[in-house]
Amino acid sequence: MDTDLVCWKCGGPIHGLPMPLARLAECRLCHAELHVCRLCEFYDRKVADQCREPVADSVKEKERANFCGYFQPRPHAYMPAGGSQTQAAKAGLHALFGIESKQENDKAINAADRLRRELDQLFGDDRKNNN
Ligand SMILES: [Zn+2]
């Protein structure tokens, strides 16, 4: 099964390509090279050379096809730039409401309530209609 493999660059599915991936295999959607560190099981930004395979020769170009014999494609390798959307949304809420004190926190809750009522008005509130 290779259905969980996605392009490290565009997130598009990688299927129909012969496995193991050829060194010059490329994404059918964005034509990114796929035999690259960014798609590899051993790729890890937190370690030296960004590779957890201790024996592998270091590869400088993490986004170019490499000759590494330890290459293992990793499912769900797509990492959008800028971190997770959830984190960004949370940070946005904190910035919006400036939650720093109890009072501020209450204000934020009131603001959230008001926002919810406005949304209910916008989209209709089934709960009210049913009761
Ligand atoms: Zn792609």
Image: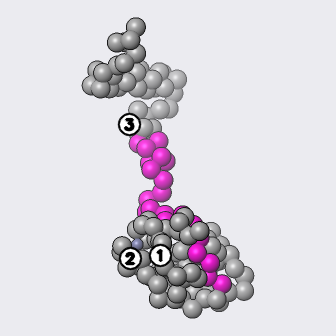
Picture residue at 43% right of the left edge, 34% below the top: 98
Question: In which image quadrant can residue 40 be found?
Answer: bottom right
Instruction: Assess whether mark 2 and mark 1 are in contact (beta carbons under 8 angstroms).
Output: yes
Q: Secondary structure at mark 3?
A: helix
The chief SS type of the magenta part is loop
Taking the view exactly as shown, the residue that stands out farthest to the right is 54
In the depicted view, which residue is nearer to us: 10 or 57? 10
Q: Is residue 101 above or below residue 13?
A: above
- Decide if ligand 1 comes within 8 Å of the CB at mark 2: yes
In the depicted view, which residue is nearer to us: 107 or 13? 13
Picture residue at 45% right of the left edge, 67% below the top: 13
Q: In the rendered view, does 119 fall on the left or right side of 90? A: left
Q: Nearer the viewer, mark 3 or mark 2?
A: 2
Instruction: Assess whether mark 3 and mark 1 are in contact (beta carbons under 8 angstroms).
Output: no
Marks 3 and 2 sit apart, C-alpha to C-alpha, by: 41 Å
Question: In which image quadrant can residue 124 be found?
Answer: top left
Question: Whole-percent x and y of residue 18?
Answer: 52, 82
In the depicted view, which residue is nearer to us: 129 or 79? 129
Is the residue marked by circle 3 packed among few (<14), some (14-19), or many (20+) residues within 10 Å?
few
Amino acid type, residue under disc 1 in the picture: Gly
Q: In the rendered view, does 116 fall on the left or right side of 3? A: left
**Which residue position holds label 2?**
28
Q: Is residue 105 above or below residue 128?
A: below
Q: Secondary structure at mark 2?
A: loop
Question: Whole-percent x and y of residue 25?
Answer: 47, 84
**Which residue position holds label 1?**
16
- Decide if ligand 1 comes within 8 Å of the CB at mark 1: no
**Which residue position holds label 3?**
96
Please give the range of residues in magenta: 70-92
Instruction: Indicate how the structure is coloured in the image.
Output: one colour
